[in-house]
Image (spheres, rainbow, N blue to C red):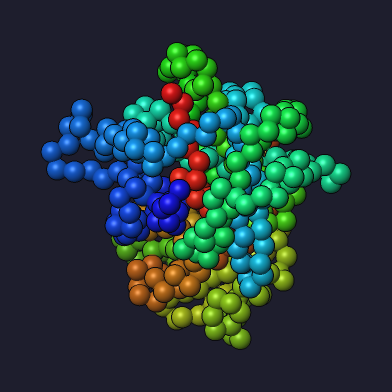
Amino acid sequence: MAKDLSKVLCPPYDVITPTARNELYDRDLHNIIRIILSKDLPGDTEFRNKYTRAEEYLKSWRDENILIRDPQASIYAYEQEFSIEGKKSTRRGFMALVKIEDQRTGSIYPHEATLPKKREDRLRLMRACRANLSPIFALYPEEKEEDVYSLLRPALSGPPEMDLVWDDGSRNRAWSISDWATIESVSKLMEKRPLFIADGHHRYEVATTFSKEVQGSLGGRADYVMMMLVSMNDPGLFILPIHRLVRVPEENPNLSVVDILEEYFYIEPQEQVSDYASLNRELAKSPDHIFGLYVGSNKKYYLLSLVNDKAPDVAFKEEPKCFRRLDTRILHGLVLDKILGEHAGEEKYLTYVHDAHEAIEQVNDEEYDLAFFMKPTTIEQVKDVASERLKMPPKTTFFHPKLLTGLVINCIE
């Protein structure tokens, strides 16, 4: 515990760029990045590779007491204090083991599709390490008169086991709670609640596959997976938008983006808008299904609004209403898929960014031609789509802030 925790933790693997990975490697010999994103090296083989190195790191850190097993079964209260739009907020939840269920019939609901390459990578890592290296982020419904987290508050009167400020300015605190009466009370209140996966879909699918592979040979411990559980009523729960950057395919010079847009949208020039902040103010006070647009060729901003509000219902009539009314479904189905055609899944022509200023910069640098700005998806939409056992289009949700990796690890063996 003598180490500076800010040097040994990291964000989730799926938001770490190659540059950030190198920086995290250089921070500390025991940064968790060496396990969750170990590097490929020259001469790697089937028997000696980044996965076996991750296993070796985990074993040696346990042997050297860099990682110390909690002597008692525990759950972990986790609070993140952060600022958003100039206001301070706190998101509260707790980490615990949750029994894995069949996604087709159980009460754990994903909302995002996963990618085969990422699933295989995470599965190979789990086979090597036999551990949940970071929690799945899941949400649970809660009536106003209920408050599961209140059961944990008496245990939070003392100092936290972990307390650090991360690079993004968020303060992260975690308390270990081993009082069995408290754990049982929380378990009883959570017993019949559905869970909606917010982040960590690949990890959940991999844990499910791994559980089937070992078939109880680990004493049933692989039948559970570590989750961070947050109430849908938590005031610190924020979903941020993920914006779209588009390069118009060069092999189709006669393609008219304006014609594609005008088929379904009014294109309203924003003469008084000179930056994203002012555009976002216009977006915030606009009704549903309004999109922002920045065009590189003339450096101007626009608002896009549906000519006919029923257009998505007609275009996607075979799909459930909760799905066809998603902004991501509308934009991709009515605009982006038509602009990009066969290139719709290629990063050269379509990419996603959380930072609107970065989006504008990439358009100004002529890396992309257009930036489409989204409004955030709501918690209710996540719940509605997941309850129908549907998967949202890629990059529909971005829960902020991200959970830190390395605060708690669940070693299955």
Location of residue 253 in the rendering, given as x and y in whole percent from the top left corner: 35, 66
In the picture provided, is 48 more to the left or to the right than 304? left
Q: How many marks?
A: 0
Is residue 338 in sight in this rendering?
no
175 versus 96 height, above or below: below
- For the residue pair 321 and 383, the one nearer the viewer reads as 383
355 versus 409 height, above or below: below
- For the residue pair 184 and 357, the one nearer the viewer reads as 184
Location of residue 22 in the rendering, given as x and y in whole percent from the top left corner: 29, 56
In what quadrant of the picture does the C terminus appear? top left
Quarter of the rendering containing residue 45: top left
Q: Which residue is found at the position 43% from the left and 56% from the top?
A: 4
Location of residue 287 in the rendering, given as x and y in whole percent from the top left corner: 73, 65
| Residue at the left extreme of this rendering | 43
| Residue at the right extreme of this rendering | 145
Q: Which residue is found at the position 34% from the left and 29% from the top?
A: 128
